[in-house]
Image (cartoon, coloured by chain):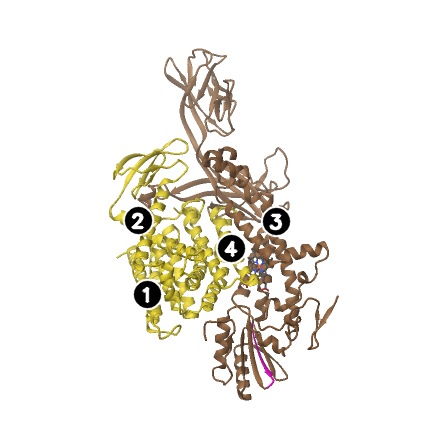
Chain colours: A yellow, B brown
C-alpha cells in the first residue's frame, strides 16, 4: 500500500474510534455509581479516543509524507485537522477535569466536522506559490489548535444550557437551544444528502446566463430545486429545477444549502418523533448530574487556554506570513477580518465575564456565539465570501 | 482629600472599598454575600472623582462597559465590511460606482453610497480604533496603580469579615500545631510564598499573573501606535516596479541608489507528466497546466557608485544575483522586493522584410526594437526605411486618427517610409498587426512581417517598512501579557486563628477548581476542615 491509501485508512480508523468512544462516554454518564469519578466506561472511552487520535495523527503524518507538505492546504485537509485538534483539546481538558460528559458531546461535534470535511474533494493537491512556505504549516496548525480549544468552551457551554434551561414549557431560550441542536443535525443532513446523491451518481448539467450576460455551464450533483439564472438542461439526469434564481445568486450552492437544511429538518423531526419531546429536553436528564459550576469553569478555562493560542496562530503568525506572501501583514481580506472578529468577540467575552460578572448561563450563550463565529469563518467565508484564502 | 482610617489602623485613600491591609469592607454592611474581590476593592480614580471635564472623560473611557461597547461596535462594523468585497479587491478595470451597482443590484449601490466599500479606511472606523486605544490606556491606568498598592499593602492578618466572605472558606475547631506546620511546609513545597504574623498565615503565589492584562494592553497600545506610524513620512515605502527581461531599472524609493536587472522571468505550472502520482487526480480536476507552481524573477541587484549626474548613465556595481519568488522576497538594506504580478510574452521587437512587390523579392530586412525604435534603418544599396510614426498601443481615436493608448507595445503599429532606388522620395506604408495599408495610393514596395520577439515582464512591489519593528514588539508584549495572565493564576490562602477556631479562606482570580483541588489535597491528611465553595449550591 502506498502512503496515500494508508493515510485514508487511518482516517477511517480514527472516525470509527471516535464513534465507539462516544458510546463509551454515553455509558459512563449513565453509570450512576460515580458522578464524576472514574468509571470503567469512562476509561474505555478515553482510551479509545486516544487510539483514534493516534490513528488520526498517523493519517496526518502519512499524508504529509505522501504529498510533501503538511496536509492543511485545502478545505478537506484543514477541516479534518480542525476536527483532530478538537479531539486533542478534549483529551487535554478531560485529563484536567475528568468530565465524561464532555466526551459525549465533544466527540460527536468532532465527528460531524470530519464527516463534513470529507464531503469536499479529498485528493492531495499540489501547492500554489503563495502556500509554499513553512508559515502555512505554522499558521494554520496553531490557528486550528486555538479554534479547537475555544470550541471545547462551546461544548461545555452547550451542556450547561441543556442542563439549566427550563424546557418544560415553550420559551425563547428553549427555542434557541433547539435551534443550535437543529443546526448540528443539519450538518448531518448535509453529509447524508451528499452521500446519497453520490451513491446514486447523480449528475446533470445546465447552461445558464451570468451577470454579464455570458453563457456558462454548471454541473449539479444534487437534484436541482433551484436552478441558475435562465437555466437550460444539457445533459445528465433530466430533472428540471423548480425555479431559476437571479444571476447574482450562486444557485448551485444555494441548492446544496436547501438540501442540507431540508435533510436536517427531516432528521430532526424523525428524532423528535421518536423521542416524543424536544431534543434538548430529552438530553436534559442525561446531563443532570454534572455540576453546573464545573461546566462553567471548563467553558471559561477553555477560552483562557484557547484565546492566546488563537491570537498567536490566527493573527500574529497570519500577519507574518501575509507580510511575506502578499507583501503586507494585513489587507482586510474577509478571512483576516473574520479572524479579527473572532478575536474581538472572545476579548468581549473575557471582559464581560471579568467585569460584568457574566457567568453561568450568559457565559454559556457567549461560548455558543463564539463557536458560531468560528464556524462561520470556516464554512461561510470559504464558500460564500471568496477572497485570497478561499480554498474552494 | 479625605483618607479613611480602618479599625486595623491602616490609612486608606478616599474611595477604597476593602481596606488595603486587612481587607475589612470599609462601608460595613451587615451581609454575608461574598466580597467583591475585583481589583482588591481598591480606590480607583474613576470611582472617586466626577467633577471636571477631564474626570468625565476619564470616567467614560475607564469604564469596562464602555470598552466592551467599543469592542462590539468595532466587531460589527468589521463584519459589515465583509458583506461585499472592499474596493481594493474589485477588478481593476471597473470603477467602484459601476461595480457595486452592477454586481449586487440596489444593495450593492447602497453599500457603495454608504461608503462601506472602503469601510476600514473611513474616518469613523479609524475613530473607533482610536477610541479603543484611548479606552485601553485610561482603563489600565485607572486600575493598575491602585491594584499594585493594594497587593503591596495587604497584611497577613485579615478582618474576620473578609475571610468569612471569601468563596473558599472553612472553619475548624480542633487541630494540632504539627498539622499547621505540615500544611505550611506543603504550601512551601507548592511554591507558595509564606508570610506569618501573630500565628496567622498568608500563602500566596502567582501574583505576577495579575499584571498580565496590563502587559497585554500595553502590547496592544504599542501595536496600535505602530499601525499609526505608517503615516509618518519615511517610515513606510510602498512602490511598484515593472521590469522587462533584460532591462535594468532604478528601484523606486531608494533615491536612485539601487538598480535591479531582470535577467529572466518564468512561470511554471503543474504538469501531469512531471508531477508525482499523488497529484494526478487534483491536476485532472483543475486542468493540466492550470495550477501555478512557481513565479520567479531572476534578478541582479546593483548599487550606484559615485554621484548622481543627470543625463549620464550611472556607474553600477553588482551586489548580488538573486531569485524573487512568492514568499521569498529579495531583502537588502531594509528594503524588500516581492514578486506580485507579471505579464508574459510582451512584444519586444518586430522584424520586417522590405519586399519588391513586382518581383516578389525581399531586398532587405530590419528589426524594430519596440521600446527604443530607430528613426532610420539603412538596408544598403540605396534601400532605406524611415520610421515616420510609431504607435505602441494602436487604436483609432475619436477623430478617426491613429493614436496610441499607452506606451506599452500591446498592439504596435508603424508608419514607414520606404526609400528605394526607384522611389528616392519614398513610399508610405502603414503597418500594424494584421494590417497593411497604403494610404497614399499603390506602392511598388511593401513591408512584410517577418517575426516578433517577446519578453516576459515581472511586477514587483518595493517595500520598506520601519513600522514592522513596532508591530512585532507590540505583538510580542501582547502575547507575553495574555500568557502571563491566562496560564498562571494568582492564588492566596489565609490561615487565621479567630477566637478558638482556625479559619481557612482562599482566593484565586481564575481556575477555582484547580485551587480547591490543590488546597484540599494539602488538607487531606490533617484534621482541618476541607475548604468549601460557598458559591456552589449543587453539591451538598
Ligand atoms: C481588543 C482589545 C482588548 C483585548 C484583546 C483585551 C484583552 C484582555 C485580556 C486577555 C484580559 C485578561 C482577561 C482575563 O484574565 O480573563 C483583559 C483584562 C482586562 N481588560 Fe482588556 N482587552 C482589550 C480591550 C480593553 C479595553 C478597551 C478595556 C477598557 C475599557 C479593557 C479593560 C480591561 C480590564 C479592566 C481588565 C481586567 C484587569 C484585571 O483583572 O486586573 N480591555 N483584557
Looking at the image, residue B247 lies above or below residue A92:
above
| Real-space Cα separation, disc 2 to disc 4, in angstroms | 33 Å
Q: Position of residue A381 (x, y in %)?
A: 44, 47
| Real-space Cα separation, disc 4 to disc 1, in angstroms | 32 Å
Examine the image and state in which quarter residue B272 appears. top left
| Real-space Cα separation, disc 2 to disc 3, in angstroms | 49 Å
- Is B495 included in the stretch rendered in magenta? yes
Secondary structure beneath disc 2?
A: helix
Q: Which mark is residue B228?
A: 3
- Is A148 included in the stretch rendered in magenta? no
Q: Is mark 4 within 8 Å of ligand 1?
A: no
Q: Which mark is residue A21?
A: 1
Rendered residue at 52%/37% (across/down): B110
Secondary structure beneath disc 1?
A: helix
Q: Which residues are magenta?
A: B491-499
| Real-space Cα separation, disc 4 to disc 3, in angstroms | 23 Å
State whether residue A134 appears in this view.
Answer: no
Q: Which residue is mark 2?
A: A194
Q: Please give left or right for residue A171 compared with residue A185 in the image.
A: right
Looking at the image, residue A180 lies above or below residue A97:
above
Q: Which residue is mark 4?
A: A345
Specify the quarter for ligand 1.
bottom right
Q: Residues within 10 Å of mark 1 (few under 14, many from 20)?
A: many
Q: Nearer the viewer, residue B304 or B439?
A: B439
Chain holding disc 4: A
Q: Residues within 10 Å of mark 2 (few under 14, many from 20)?
A: many
Q: Which mark is residue A82?
A: none
Q: Please give left or right for residue B384 compared with residue A201 in the image.
A: right
Tell which residue pokes out farthest to the front in this image: A169
Secondary structure beneath disc 3?
A: helix
Rendered residue at 25%/38% (across/down): A238
Amino acid at each position: 500500500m502506498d502512503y496515500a491509501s494508508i493515510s485514508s485508512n487511518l482516517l477511517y480508523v480514527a472516525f470509527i474510534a471516535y464513534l465507539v468512544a462516544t458510546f463509551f462516554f454515553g455509558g459512563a454518564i449513565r453509570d450512576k455509581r460515580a458522578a464524576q469519578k472514574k468509571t470503567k466506561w469512562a476509561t474505555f472511552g478515553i482510551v479509545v479516543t486516544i487510539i483514534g487520535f493516534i490513528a488520526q495523527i498517523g493519517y496526518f503524518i502519512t499524508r504529509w509524507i505522501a504529498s510533501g507538505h503538511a496536509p492543511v492546504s485545502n478545505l478537506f485537509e484543514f477541516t479534518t485537522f480542525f476536527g483532530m485538534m478538537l479531539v486533542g483539546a478534549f483529551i487535554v481538558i478531560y485529563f484536567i477535569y475528568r468530565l465524561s460528559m464532555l466526551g459525549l458531546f465533544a466527540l460527536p461535534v468532532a465527528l460531524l466536522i470530519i464527516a463534513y470535511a470529507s464531503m469536499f474533494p479529498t485528493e492531495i493537491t499540489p501547492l500554489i506559490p503563495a502556500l509554499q512556505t513553512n508559515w502555512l504549516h505554522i499558521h494554520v496548525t496553531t490557528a486550528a489548535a486555538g479554534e479547537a480549544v475555544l470550541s471545547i468552551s462551546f461544548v461545555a457551554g452547550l451542556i450547561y444550557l441543556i442542563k439549566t434551561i427550563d424546557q418544560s414549557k415553550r420559551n425563547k431560550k428553549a427555542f434557541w437551544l433547539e435551534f443550535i441542536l437543529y443546526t448540528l443535525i443539519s450538518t448531518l443532513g448535509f453529509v447524508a444528502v451528499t452521500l446519497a446523491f453520490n451513491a446514486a451518481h447523480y449528475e446533470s448539467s445546465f447552461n445558464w446566463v451570468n451577470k454579464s450576460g455570458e453563457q456558462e455551464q454548471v454541473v449539479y450533483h444534487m437534484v436541482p430545486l433551484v436552478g441558475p439564472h435562465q437555466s437550460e438542461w444539457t445533459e445528465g439526469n433530466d430533472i428540471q429545477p423548480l425555479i431559476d434564481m437571479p444571476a447574482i445568486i450562486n444557485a448551485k450552492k444555494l441548492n446544496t444549502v436547501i438540501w442540507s437544511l431540508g435533510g436536517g429538518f427531516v432528521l430532526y423531526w424523525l428524532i423528535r418523533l421518536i423521542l416524543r419531546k424536544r431534543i434538548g429536553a430529552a438530553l436534559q436528564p442525561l446531563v443532570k448530574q454534572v455540576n453546573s459550576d464545573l461546566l462553567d469553569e471548563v467553558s471559561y478555562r477553555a477560552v483562557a487556554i484557547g484565546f492566546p493560542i488563537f491570537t498567536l496562530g490566527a493573527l500574529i503568525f497570519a500577519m507574518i506570513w501575509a507580510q511575506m506572501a502578499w507583501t503586507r501583514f494585513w489587507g482586510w481580506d474577509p478571512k483576516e477580518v473574520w479572524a479579527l472578529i473572532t478575536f474581538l468577540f472572545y476579548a468581549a467575552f473575557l471582559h464581560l465575564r471579568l467585569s460584568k460578572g457574566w457567568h453561568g448561563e450568559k457565559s454559556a450563550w457567549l461560548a455558543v456565539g463564539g463557536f458560531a463565529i468560528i464556524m462561520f469563518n470556516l464554512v461561510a467565508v470559504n464558500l460564500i465570501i471568496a477572497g485570497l484564502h478561499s480554498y474552494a | 482629600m479625605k483618607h479613611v482610617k480602618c479599625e486595623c489602623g491602616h490609612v486608606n485613600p478616599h474611595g477604597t472599598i476593602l481596606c488595603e491591609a486587612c481587607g475589612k469592607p470599609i462601608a460595613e454592611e451587615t451581609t454575608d454575600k461574598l466580597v467583591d474581590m475585583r481589583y482588591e476593592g481598591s480606590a480607583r480614580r474613576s470611582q472617586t472623582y466626577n467633577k471636571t471635564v477631564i474626570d468625565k472623560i476619564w470616567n467614560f473611557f475607564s469604564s469596562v462597559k464602555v470598552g466592551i461597547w467599543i469592542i462590539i461596535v468595532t466587531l460589527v462594523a468589521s463584519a459589515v465590511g465583509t458583506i461585499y468585497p472592499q474596493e481594493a479587491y474589485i477588478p481593476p478595470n471597473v470603477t467602484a460606482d459601476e461595480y457595486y451597482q452592477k454586481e449586487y443590484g440596489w444593495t450593492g449601490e447602497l453599500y457603495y453610497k454608504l461608503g462601506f466599500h472602503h469601510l476600514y479606511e473611513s474616518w469613523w472606523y479609524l475613530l473607533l480604533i482610536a477610541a479603543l486605544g484611548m479606552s485601553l490606556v485610561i482603563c489600565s491606568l485607572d486600575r493598575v496603580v491602585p491594584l499594585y498598592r493594594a497587593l503591596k499593602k495587604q497584611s497577613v492578618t485579615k478582618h474576620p469579615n473578609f475571610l468569612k466572605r471569601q468563596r473558599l472558606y472553612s472553619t475548624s475547631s480542633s487541630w494540632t500545631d504539627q498539622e499547621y506546620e505540615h500544611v505550611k511546609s506543603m504550601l512551601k513545597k507548592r511554591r507558595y510564598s509564606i508570610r506569618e504574623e501573630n500565628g496567622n498565615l498568608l500563602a500566596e503565589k502567582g501574583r505576577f499573573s495579575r499584571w498580565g492584562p496590563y502587559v497585554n494592553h500595553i502590547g496592544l497600545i504599542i501595536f496600535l501606535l505602530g499601525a499609526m506610524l505608517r503615516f509618518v513620512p519615511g517610515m513606510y515605502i510602498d512602490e511598484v516596479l515593472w521590469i522587462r527581461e533584460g532591462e535594468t531599472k532604478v528601484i523606486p524609493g531608494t533615491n536612485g541608489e539601487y538598480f535591479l536587472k531582470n535577467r529572466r522571468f518564468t512561470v511554471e505550472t503543474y504538469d501531469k507528466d512531471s508531477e508525482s502520482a499523488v497529484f494526478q487526480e487534483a491536476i485532472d480536476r483543475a486542468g493540466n497546466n492550470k495550477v501555478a507552481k512557481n513565479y520567479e524573477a531572476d534578478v541582479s541587484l546593483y548599487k550606484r557608485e559615485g554621484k548622481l549626474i543627470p543625463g549620464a548613465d550611472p556607474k553600477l556595481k553588482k551586489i548580488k544575483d538573486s531569485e524573487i519568488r512568492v514568499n521569498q522576497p529579495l531583502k537588502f538594506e531594509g528594503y524588500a522586493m516581492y514578486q506580485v504580478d507579471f505579464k508574459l510574452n510582451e512584444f519586444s521587437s518586430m522584424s520586417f522584410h522590405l519586399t519588391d512587390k513586382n518581383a516578389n523579392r525581399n531586398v532587405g530586412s530590419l528589426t524594430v526594437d519596440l521600446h527604443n525604435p530607430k528613426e532610420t534603418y539603412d538596408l544598403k544599396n540605396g534601400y532605406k526605411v524611415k520610421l515616420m510614426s510609431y504607435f505602441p498601443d494602436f487604436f483609432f481615436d475619436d477623430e478617426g486618427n491613429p493614436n496610441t493608448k499607452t506606451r506599452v507595445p500591446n498592439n504596435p503599429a508603424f508608419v514607414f517610409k520606404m526609400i528605394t532606388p526607384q522611389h528616392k522620395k519614398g513610399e508610405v506604408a502603414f503597418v500594424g498587426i494584421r494590417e497593411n495599408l497604403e494610404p497614399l495610393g499603390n506602392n511598388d514596395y511593401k513591408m512584410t512581417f517577418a517575426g516578433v520577439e517577446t519578453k516576459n515582464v515581472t511586477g514587483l512591489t518595493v517595500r520598506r517598512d520601519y513600522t514592522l519593528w513596532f508591530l512585532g514588539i507590540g505583538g510580542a508584549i501582547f502575547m507575553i501579557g495574555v500568557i502571563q495572565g491566562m496560564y498562571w493564576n494568582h492564588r492566596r490562602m489565609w490561615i487565621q486563628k479567630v477566637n478558638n477556631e482556625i479559619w481557612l479562606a482562599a482566593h484565586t482570580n481564575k481556575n477555582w477548581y484547580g485551587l480547591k483541588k490543590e488546597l484540599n489535597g494539602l488538607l487531606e491528611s490533617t484534621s482541618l476542615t476541607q475548604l468549601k465553595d460557598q458559591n456552589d449550591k449543587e453539591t451538598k
